[in-house]
Image: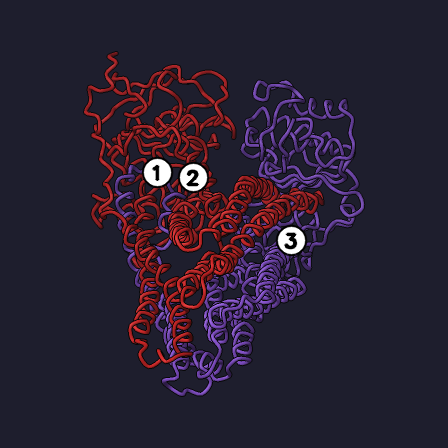
Amino acid sequence: MGDSSGNEVYGLARKLGGAGRRAALSWQIARALFRLGFAAAMAIFAGEMIEEGTLSVPALLGAIIGLAFSSCAGMFADLGAARAETGVVNGLRTALQGALSRMPPTQSRLRPAGALIAGLQRHPEALSSLVISHAAARSMLGLGPLLAAAAVALVSWHAALTLLLAIPVMIIFFALLGTAVRSRAEMQERAFGRLAAQFADRIRTLPTILANHALGREHGKIERRMTAYADSTMGVLKVAFLNAGVIDFFSALAIALLAVFLGLGHLGLVQVPGFSRLELWQSLFILVIAADFFTPFRRYAEQYHLKAEGEAAAQQLQWYFDDSNAASTLDGKNGAEVFSATGVDKFDAAKLPAAGLIAISGPSGAGKSTLLRLLAGIEPPSSEVAALPQVTTGGCAWIATDIYVPAGSLAGAVAWNRNAVDRAAIRRAAESVGLLDEMLLPGGLDAPIAEGGTNLSGGQRMRIGIARALLAGGIVFADEPTAKLDPMTAKLVRQALVEIALERLVIVATHDDRLIEAADQHHVLHLRNRIDKAVAA
Amino acid sequence: MNIAANSAPIATPQPIPGPRHGKAPWRLAILFAMAAAASGILLTGVSVWFLAAVALAGLGPAALAFNFHTPAAFVRLFALSRTACKYGERVIGHRAALLDQVRRRAGLFAAMANAPTTRAASWQLGNQDRLSDYMEDVEDVDYARLRVGMPTLVLTGAMAALSLATAWLALPALIPIAALSILLIMTLRRAMPRASARWAAARSSQRAAARLLGAALAAVIPLKAERAFANVLASTFARFDDAAAALLAQRRHLAAVDMLVGIVGPAAALSVLAAAWHAGSRGEALLVPAFLAFAWLTFGETAIGVSRIVIGRVRERAARQGLKSWTAAAGVDMAASPAFAVLHTLALTNVPRQTPDGRRLGEAASRTFEAGNPTALVGASGAGKTTLLKQIAGWIGTDHDGRFAADGIMLLAARRRAMSHLSLHDAAILSDTIRENLFAPDASDAQCWEALTAVELDRRVEAAGGLDAWINQDMLSLGEAQRLNLARALLSRAPLVLLDEPVEHLDTEQGARILDRVFRRLADQIVIYSSHNQQAAPQGMQVAL
């Protein structure tokens, strides 16, 4: 299987689809056998009717039964493949769900969310087609022609041999064409690869184009480029279609040759072994099966694109299961290597008080957020900082502008992920951070929240986070809670944090001097991997 | 103040160039497809007729007199023409589809550019998942004619021709054929709406999953900290499962269609022979019915895979509907090339401040901006800075929302659009050369380099290979993309330059340095920019929102 054989995801998909693929393949074989039975019965029915002037009822019945059975087997094969592919898709998604939920945030943020989502939507489907439909077509490519040849051999082994001889010749053609197609495709990729997705790119960047008054120019440009790309694509397709052309040619040639040979045999003009003194039904049978002989080739050729797409999908999905980059995420490449050096003053988690406000400050890039994530236990622990044990026992609340806000009502957003809280408590929490008396969010607790919280400002999201923290959740972490807020809201947020800190431990990463002043402890992170205990009030 | 939107020369609408190609060669493609189908059917038919004829002749003394050259020649002819026509059908069909694709996509691009949603809030197709979804629709429409229209036409044509021949030669055989056809049509009529419904359900589940997953990934750190990420993912992936189940159901509905279609050809073949026998035909009189019977058999082979046509049709319909939502209500505002005059002042009177979704915010804005005095709109997140910039740029809001006057002349939205350079904070990088990304076709190389140097990108561009080096979004960091965006503003000759969060993603010192250069360069232009940092601008030069 080339590149994908060593691929873990491909292996998983194969395993998930194993039983389904075998079932679909069995039905396809059954269909091929019934189809041979139908062809034989049909040939006998027609042959005896014409040659001997008798209506063979058994042959007619045989043809009808063969047809009915092969149709049903075909339907079961389709249904089986559909079911198996859905099974593979669901199995892959379950595995991906697990991988994604275990993945440290630094890794999942290495890829744009949109690309992750698009991949999760499409790649499992592409891979499932590869391991079911495409794999079954590949098996039939080996089995189908052999079954057909065996059936023909029952009548004339010479004719069967003639058919089989076509295969090596076809393979030579395929090899020659394959090289030509590949070199043309590579040439196109080199010369025009950049133009492949110009339309999608210009749609993606449309507002930028409008803002720069470049619509007319870009319109002309993409039209020219799409035309150039279409022309180069045609250059590749003209050669690529020869592949299907070879199959068409040989199947037509086989029918024409067999028809002429068999005809000469019937006339008794030529004595070709295996083609003379046959009954008409035998000739008809050979002719019908000769057409079927090439069908698996055509089916396989039609599914060629499934292979490329499926293999690309397997490559892409492999990323989710690569633990190697999980381990390396805290290394230098994100500039986040902060706590791995030796001899650093320890941020001693064991000595943290049970309650109080702890401020962590330092220039951007010093690792404030990383420290917070390590303490909350959502990054693989570094040698210096481990997750706070209190987080595992008592849970934690995380206050930031990027908190998750479900669509629905404000009450729902505040109470989200908090165990059954009564409405009065929700109201108290929301009121204490000033979420209710705002002109900005009319409707009080029932104020509608749009999908993704798009109708909320950063300040409002921050306040929802604090309201949630008031409702439950052990230690409180807050990442830059006052940045980008107007002075009024910033003040309110500071007050709320100080209040929570009376009873619980609150750890904030911040630049805000006033918040630092209000803190019980202040740690400064320097760019060179140091944590200094600066203020201990 | 004169209401004279048209007194200044309005930019002449630049006509979008039409397709430069002639009509796509669909007729030729269809002709080839018909010829290929006919050759295939005739190849089998003639071969069978020939075999049966020689078998009957071989039994008697006629064997020696039998002219087998003519039928043998026909057999070879049909074999070759089937191969050649099939190849022609593929090549010319794809050629036609690609030509159509270029034309349709160019038109779609223009239509989307003119849709008001493109300028409104944040651009949703900037997200990879939404873009993939959209491109799926575009492709479903692009290939509909090749994958749905053409095969449908050929199959119907072949079916009609064979039915006519059957009516002529073995009329009673039409009864089972008609019965099967009616059954097939009834099944199709039942399956089509169901397949459409399942497809719609699958798409909507997928989109819901994408939205939820997007929200979950954006909040991954808070969710992980609160140990809620796994639960949110589970509810998200449940939507993916719904989508998969809907697609499975769709395939189930269509499996029966495929089965019925597969029966038509062989059943017709048997019926034709039986009908001819029943009508008393014997021996030589059965040759032509045998021809027809095996022609039906071959037709059955070509009809395999009808469900793919049905799915193609279902998807095409859904896709057209989906694309319409992006281009609906297309305005008449064509790409106006900027008409740049010199402006000294821009006065805003009672311009309502609002959130991106249109809710009113605080007091209306009234303020005069002057060329040479870059002014900052300062306010916390959510204060409506971006929205006000877009209102000034004429991107959102109606002409009744407050008044905008430049040097005493009222400017309507279209005019402001033409006169302003809007630097979006999420401005994108095009997959193109650096020169093209600067959007300054008239600028000299020296001017381009000067701008790149001012935004401290000169080294980076040199390393990448100069102005004609190809770049894309992924090659630049957020900071580099932002600086390239500022270089675009630097090269703009628009009298009104609007910069949204120009120093975002830059460190404080570099941001201040670059902004200073930008302001000096744009000293003759009215510059308005937004910032959430109150220290960013001197007191007199800021508007607090």
Q: Name the mark nearer the viewer: 1 or 2.
A: 2
Q: Provide residue B490's location: percent of width, then percent of height.
A: 30, 40
- The residue at the point 22 percent across, 50 percent down is B445
Q: Nearer the viewer, residue A199 or B271?
A: B271
Q: Which residue is drawn at 57% across and 54% down?
A: A336
Check disc 3 and report the residue beneath it: A90
Vertical placement of residue B200 versus B85, above or below? above
Q: How is the image coloured?
A: by chain
Amino acid type shown at disc 2: Arg
- Label 2 to label 3, Cα distance in Å? 29 Å
Q: Quadrant of the N terminus of chain B?
A: top left
Q: What element carries label 1?
A: helix
Residue at x 59%, y 38% (from the top left corner): A402
- Amino acid type of the residue tagged 1 in the rendering: Asp
The answer to which quarter of the image holds residue B417 is top left
A388 sits left or right of A530 in the view: right
Residue nearer the viewer, A487 or A237: A237
Kind of residue at badge 3: Asn
**Residue under numbered circle 1:** B516
User: Would you identify the image quadrant in which residue A400 lies?
Assistant: top right
Indicate which label's residue lies in the foreground, 3 or 1. Answer: 3
- Residue B523 image point, x, y percent: 27, 32
